Image (spheres, helix red, strand yellow):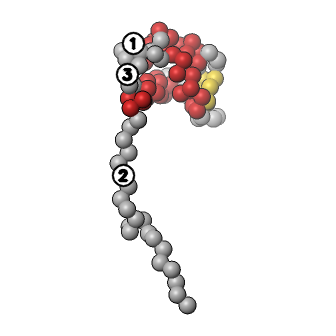
Amino acid sequence: MATAKKATAATAAPAKKRTPNAAFMKPLTPSPALAAVVGKDPLPRTEIISKLWVYIKANKLQDAANKRMINADAKLKEVFGKPQVSMFEMAGLIGKHVS
């Protein structure tokens, strides 16, 4: 009875280094409401999201019971349009505030 050899991670081809999508790296200008949180300088979308997380954590805006939810303060309420959003919704809502 012959046994088939299984490919292991060690014998698999090395993974390609991931390159960022050019669309995510394009500097975007934030709206005045978003600029109050991340600054007025044009930034790539990835940096905008990073700065938002710095702001959220610095101001302890993550919901204590469910860390996926973000409780908006006055500045973020202008950006999100509602008092609480999920972290998955956040990126979509930011799209309306960049150009």
**Identity of the residue drawn at 44% across and 69% down:** 8
Q: Tell me residue 64's x, y (percent).
A: 61, 32
Instruction: Return the residue at label 3.
Output: 27
Specify few, some or many for label 3: CA neighbours under 10 Å numbering under 14, 14-19, or 20 or more.
some
Vertical arrangement, residue 54 with respect to residue 5, above or below: above
Query: In the rendered structure, which disc, 3 or 2, sits on the residue that comes first in sequence?
Result: 2
Q: Are marks 1 and 3 in contact (CB under 8 Å)?
A: no
Q: Secondary structure at mark 2?
A: loop
Q: Residue furthest bottom?
A: 1
- Assign a secondary structure to mark 1: loop
Q: Where residue 56 appears, x then y in whole percent?
A: 50, 25
Residue 10 in the image: above or below residue 95: below
Give the mark, 1 or 2, whose residue is nearer the N terminus: 2
Tell which of 4 and 60 is nearer to you. 4
Q: Which residue is mark 1?
A: 40
Q: Nearer the viewer, residue 84 or 20?
A: 20
Q: CA distance from mark 1 to mark 3?
A: 12 Å
Mark 3–mark 2 Cα distance, whole angstroms, equals 26 Å
Q: Are marks 3 and 2 in contact (CB under 8 Å)?
A: no
Residue bearing mark 2? 16
Q: Position of residue 53 (x, y in %)?
A: 47, 28
Q: Amino acid at mark 3?
A: Pro
Query: Measuring 37% from the left and 62% from the top, which residue is drawn there?
Result: 13
Tell whether 78 sits left or right of 35: right
Q: Quadrant of residue 1?
A: bottom right
Label 1 Cα crowd, 10 Å radius (few <14 / some 14-19 / many 20+): some
- The percent coordinates of residue 7 (x first, y second) are 45, 70
